[in-house]
Amino acid sequence: MVQAERLYLVLLGVPGAGKGTQASLLEDALAIPQISTGDLFRYNLKNQTELGVLAKSYMDRGDLVPDEVTIRMVEERLQREDCAKGAIFDGFPRNLAQAVALDQLTAVHGGIRRVLLISLEDDEAMRRITGRRVCRTCGAVYHVDFNPPKVEGVCDLDGGELYQRDDDKPETVRNRLFVYYKQTAPLVGYYFAKGLLTEVDGSQPIETVQAALLAALRDAAAVGG
Ligand code: ADP
Ligand code: AMP
Ligand code: ZN
């Protein structure tokens, strides 16, 4: 049975490129939810679920959590009602097996509409990651210099405490970059070959990157307006 098309978007880019920041803004602009596998794992970790406990050892090393559990988690998330018009994937897929699984999961609704690659040099990504702070309550993302909260250490949205992720230490970040180039970067070719890829310069200010992403989606006729 043919079902209504949905707006499924993928954000690609090195750790620190700004995927989460941009996905949150796109969520507001397009009224479809952000699905961040990293956030889902951190939520499970905070709540000490079986999934969270399993994911922790991989996350602490900066390695990928096994595909089977990651894909099942995304499949379940996609069944929730808020995904009825589509979703913005941030941090997923991270390897070829996940990309193929995502194609299958989204096929009945027209598949992935567009893939946005946010490009950034490694040294800049490192600067962004080491200054990143995250709200313990809502997961909002800040940067001590580039996107500071109004009050140091406190979330603008809900007053939650801001913390530094354990895996944002330089040793772990180096492995995460390595894992990106080895496992995730091949997806750039995968989506390019499907004619789905648009690259945006991620070194610009947050608002400029957001405008470029929305313009890219309009140019590709992925969204109206
Ligand atoms: P990712 O999800 O790709 O790992 P984030 O969205 O968490 O990246 O961004 C990493 C860090 O860089 C955060 O501290 C964020 O506030 C900051 N940041 C994001 N986009 C920009 C930008 N365009 N310019 C400067 N800093 C940025
Ligand atoms: P992120 O928040 O995207 O930086 O992800 C943090 C960590 O969560 C990664 O280093 C991985 O250990 C794990 N993770 C997030 N997304 C995935 C995924 N799609 N596949 C496997 N592991 C993931
Ligand atoms: Zn918050």
Image: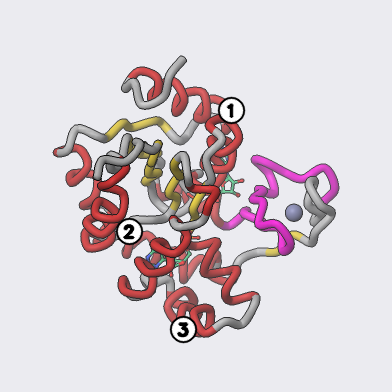
User: Dot 3: few (<14), some (14–19), or many (≥20) neighbours within 10 Å?
Assistant: some
Q: Earlier in the sequence, mark 2 or mark 1?
A: 2
Tell whether position 133 is magenta: yes
Query: Would you say 96 lies left or right of 219 here?
Result: left
Q: Which amino acid does label 2 sit on?
A: Arg
Residue with the mark numbered 1? 207
The one of 71 and 125 positioned closer to us in this rendering: 71
Q: What residue type is labelled 1?
A: Glu
Q: Is residue 87 above or below residue 134?
A: above
Where, quadrant-wise, is the N terminus in this rendering?
A: top left
Which residue lies at the image location 77% right of the left edge and 45% below the top edge?
Answer: 149
Which residue lies at the image location 53% right of the left edge and 31% below the top edge?
Answer: 30
Name the secondary structure under disc 2. loop
Q: Quadrant of residue 71?
A: bottom left
Q: Where is residue 136 in the image (x, y as percent from the top left)?
A: 72, 64
Is ligand 1 less than 8 Å from the beta carbon at label 1?
A: no
Q: In this view, does 50 lie above or below 147?
A: below
Q: Is residue 147 above or below residue 136?
A: above
